[in-house]
Amino acid sequence: MNDRDNTEVWRAVRSLAKIWAQTTVVTTMTASLPDNAKPHLRRTDAATVPWRLQGMRAGAASFFVRPLFLGSAVEYMRRQPFLGGPGPHVDDGTLDAWLQTAHAVESAHRTTVAWLRSRLPGYPMLLVPQLTRNTHLTTNFYSGSIVWLRAEFAAGHQFDNEPRDVPAKLGANAPQMAALRSGACALADAFKATPEWFSFDTTCQQLTSSDRTALQAARRGLRERLTAVDNSAADIFQQDALRRQYVEEAVEALVGLPHAYCKAFEAVNRLIELAAGDVFGQLVAYGDPKIVPASGIDFSEPSIVNVITDDPFGCHPGDLVRIDDPLVNDALRVEGSVSQFDVLNLKPSTLTLRILDGTAVWFSQN
């Protein structure tokens, strides 16, 4: 993905995130996130929602990559004793009250992503194998991706001029309602102007009847392979990996325009998920990227940089950060970290960061 051509997407993402962050429901929900809560609410003897969430994150950090999706994630983790985290018990009423706001925010975010996806050419009749039932993009079980829900296909989002009911879910006031609507439309327009969108639109229009037949055959073959995954003995993460593997194999078996169509979908879907899902959620929950002390910058591959930091516990997967180095002016997303210990102390750690090319526009905005 070439984000350098997508500066307007990043500009629109940040602008809309700022509006979301000011709404009543969002401020209530994000105030209890561990990185936002006041220190006394995160003490080990505090029976609070922030402490409970902090314990959950220690046991399952991957569920916290998308903070606006914590409603369903926390509901799942509270039923898993090994993911509940240590410390004092938080009574169900207190946690339920926070979950009510988390579910509202998650619903609004899912609706927004679904509405943006519904702008895609050919929606909802998208023939890509990636959207066959039970793939990593359509499963009812765990997925590391933002799933395309069947109910969203049937909801008629493509007929809506704006994401449905989002202002009400966020408790927006009148000025915020107008800003939310215009901000969502600006983001949709920015996506439509990207190379990824143009490529998908072009291949979609060029599909012939024989191309569609090949795509339908690929979907049928993939569906048969995926049937066994949900019933396998593999854990949820292994199942997710299997679904991705089978989808990739189905796509790579195609040739010509059907293959190009699937790869174009892959690129535009990844852009929407990254920008409107992952990055947007982090901006809403935590604000602009924080500066991380770093040295020893190593550009291991395009858009990926490894750095050495003395503050390994200050970053988590999915976090947005900046580094104080003139070689990188854009924001970066934490992809992973490796910490080293000796008998006496913690050694400097390595962070793997993805450069979000084009986000430097954030730091030139007021």
Image (tube, helix red, strand yellow):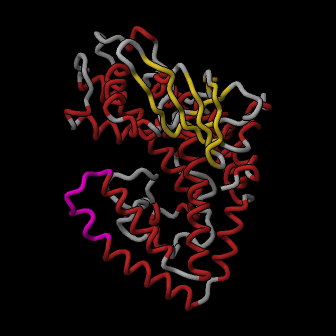
Total numbered labels placed on residues in the image: 0
Front in this rendered view, residue 327 or 2: 327
Which quarter of the rendering shows the N terminus? bottom right
359 or 122, which lies in front? Answer: 359
The image quarter containing residue 268 is bottom right
Which residue range is magenta in the image? Answer: 226-237
Q: Main secondary structure of the magenta part?
A: loop
Camera sees residue 172: no
Residue 261, x across and y down, in percent: 60, 74
Tell me the quarter of the image containing the C terminus.
Answer: top right
Question: Residue 335 location, x and y as percent?
Answer: 52, 40
The x and y percentages for residue 47 are 28, 15
User: Quick check: 124 above or below 291?
Assistant: below
What residue lies at 25% left-to-right and 69% top-to-bottom? 228
Residue 228 shown in magenta: yes
- What residue sits 38% from the left and 14% below the top? 42
85 left or right of 22 in image: left
Q: Residue at x 44, y 10 (%)?
A: 39
Determine if the magenta segment contains residue 215: no
Query: What percent of the width, then of the height, locates residue 137?
Result: 43, 60
